[in-house]
Structures are given as C-alpha cells and as structure tokens.
C-alpha cells in the first residue's frame, strides 16, 4: 500500500512540475510578444510622426536624451554673468545673437589680373 502512495506522490510532483514549466514558458512567451508589440508600436508611431511632420513642411525635431535637467539653466546663468562682466563690450554681438544685414552686390569695375 505504501508503494502505491509513493508512486502516486511521485506522479503528482511530476505533473505539478510539468504544469509549472508550461505556465512559466507561456508567461515568458506572452511577455516577449508584448514587448515586441510595444517596440513595433513605438517604431510605427515614430515613423508616422516623422512622415506627418514632413508632409506639413516642418523639420522633425531631434530628441536628446541623457541631458542633465539643470544644464540649460546653468548655461543661461553663465551667459548672463558674461554679459554683466566689466570686460564685456555691449556693442559687439555675442555668438548667439542674430544680426540683420542688408545684402547688396558690389560690382568691381577693375578687371582682375588672374
């Protein structure tokens, strides 16, 4: 009688292990399919947004990751401090300023000696 109980107990453990293995494999496969779906959705959405921007005549903006959140403010503070410094000349535009100019062609009446 104990031999039958041991055999049933071993069979029960084997079946539990098999069901557990099948469940783990099914959940892993479902997770991989979900992850693949999210990646495909993201790539498709990105491509659609780029095409939409190009159809509207706008240049798609590049997203820059990995920047320090306060880096822009530090740059602005440094630029403001440079403008306030006594060595800065107010009549000379900095590199970031825009200067409007009127373009005109000047013809040289002298022949070139090349």
Image (cartoon, helix red, strand yellow):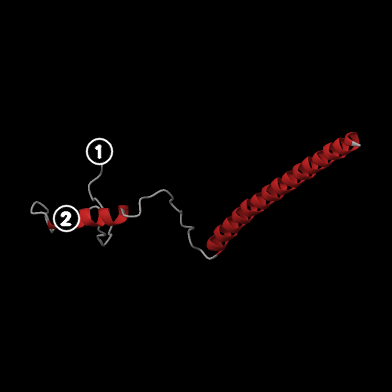
Q: Are marks 1 and 2 in contact (CB under 8 Å)?
A: no
In the image, farthest residue toward the top = 3
Closer to the camera, 86 or 52? 86
- Going by the picture, which residue comes out furthest to the left? 86
Label 2: state its secondary structure.
helix
Q: Residue 17's x, y, as percent?
A: 77, 40
SS assignment at label 1? loop
**Is 68 left or right of 87, judged from the image as shown?**
right
The answer to whether residue 86 is above or below residue 19 is below
Q: Position of residue 93 (x, y in %)?
A: 19, 56
Q: Residue at x 53, y 62 (%)?
A: 53
Q: Is residue 106 visible?
A: no
Q: To which residue does mark 2 refer?
A: 81
Direction from residue 29 to residue 68 in the image, left or right:
left
Q: Which residue is mark 1?
A: 113
Front one among 59 and 113: 59
Question: Residue 7: horizontal and vertical position, in percent?
Answer: 87, 36
């Amino acid at each position: 009688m104990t031999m039958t109980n041991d055999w049933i107990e071993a069979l029960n453990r084997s079946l539990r292990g098999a069901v557990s293995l099948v469940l783990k494999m099914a959940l892993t496969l479902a997770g991989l399919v979900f992850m693949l779906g999210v990646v495909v959705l993201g790539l498709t959405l990105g491509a659609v947004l780029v095409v939409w921007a190009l159809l509207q005549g706008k240049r798609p903006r590049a997203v820059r990751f990995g920047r320090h959140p306060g880096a822009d403010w530090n740059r602005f503070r440094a630029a403001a401090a440079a403008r306030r410094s006594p060595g800065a000349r107010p009549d000379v535009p900095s590199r970031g300023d825009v200067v409007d100019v009127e373009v005109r062609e000047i013809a040289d009446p002298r022949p070139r000696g090349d």
